[in-house]
Image (cartoon, grey):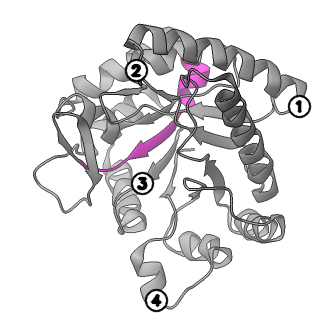
Amino acid sequence: MIRFGPSGNCKRFYDEGFKSSVEAPEWLSKQGLTAYEYSFGRGINVGDDKAKAVGEKAKEFGVEISVHAPYYINFANPADEMAEKSYNYLLNSCNKARAFGGNRIVFHPATVGKMTRGEAVELTKKRLKILADIIRANGMDDCLFCPETMGKINQIGDVGEIAEFCKIADFFLPTIDFGHINARTYGSLKTEEDYDGIIACLLNAIGAERTNKLHIHFSKIEYSTGGEVRHLTFADKVFGPEFAPLAKIFKKYKLSPVAICESDGTQADDAIEMKRIYDSIN
């Protein structure tokens, strides 16, 4: 079953008088949504008691929770002590995901920095192999660690790179952010064939079983020569991408991803629109 939901709480959630993420699962369920991503982008700042309270509500209302690890993870940092911090950010994010009752941890892999892209990718791959060993040693290999396709040109994380990273361990699962891909390729995602090529790449790299359960991010994103500039809403008519062609590809391959909308302030409303579009396709 495909699941749709937002990253975080949208503006309408607060406008309707709700204040706490503990209230989010019931609210989302009433909107027909069944997924919810909790972001630790700027730090892991939620206590276990609150996480467990949100998780209990999520279980009650059939909402699957994922978490987004801190944005400052960088497995291409030349300093080993900084890589060590990145390992720990992911382990701590996994512990919180478990407190929520979730098992998906999204993370940004790396930034090119002062190396060549090839050097940065190889260092990232080396560090992810170390990470895989650490995950196993800590008994966390029952969770899914989801490296994300990135939106800026100087970030590691195009589709091919993410596919290669996920060959390292079967608990690495791609987060395919179609808004990011569209931004870093200057608006390349327009037709069903454009989306089909991405899915075909993943099927070839990691197989049908893992591709079937992908983690998806979707939003319209403004871009410039450096790639991603800022997240937009579905009301935007300039930058894209559009969801309908992707929904058709989901149906074509009978995929059952978790699809998280990251629109700016309208993420739940746009997730509802994504579900409506998907459900309208025969």
Query: Could you tell me which residue is drawn at 24 percent across and 25 percent down?
Result: 194
Kind of residue sitting beneath label 4:
Glu
Residue at 42% across, 87% down = 15
- What residue is shown at x 33% (from left), y 38% (from top)? 180
Region in magenta:
208-221
Sooner in the amino-acid sequence: mark 1 or mark 2: 2
Instruction: Find the distance from the CA under tag 4 to the CA under tag 2.
Output: 47 Å
Q: Residue at x 28, y 45 (%)?
A: 243
**Mark 1 neighbour class, 10 Å CA radius: few under 14, some 14 to 19, many 20 or more:** few
Residue 207 visible to an observer of this rendering: no
Please tell me whether mark 4 sits on a helix, a strand or a loop.
loop
Q: Mark 1 to mark 4: distance in Å? A: 42 Å
The count of marks equals: 4
Q: Badge 4: how crowded within 10 Å, few (<14), some, or many (20+)?
A: few
Q: Amino acid at mark 1?
A: Asn
Name the residue that disc number 4 marks: 16
Q: Is residue 179 left or right of residue 262?
A: left
Sequence-earlier tag: 1 or 4: 4
Sequence-first tag of 3 and 4: 4
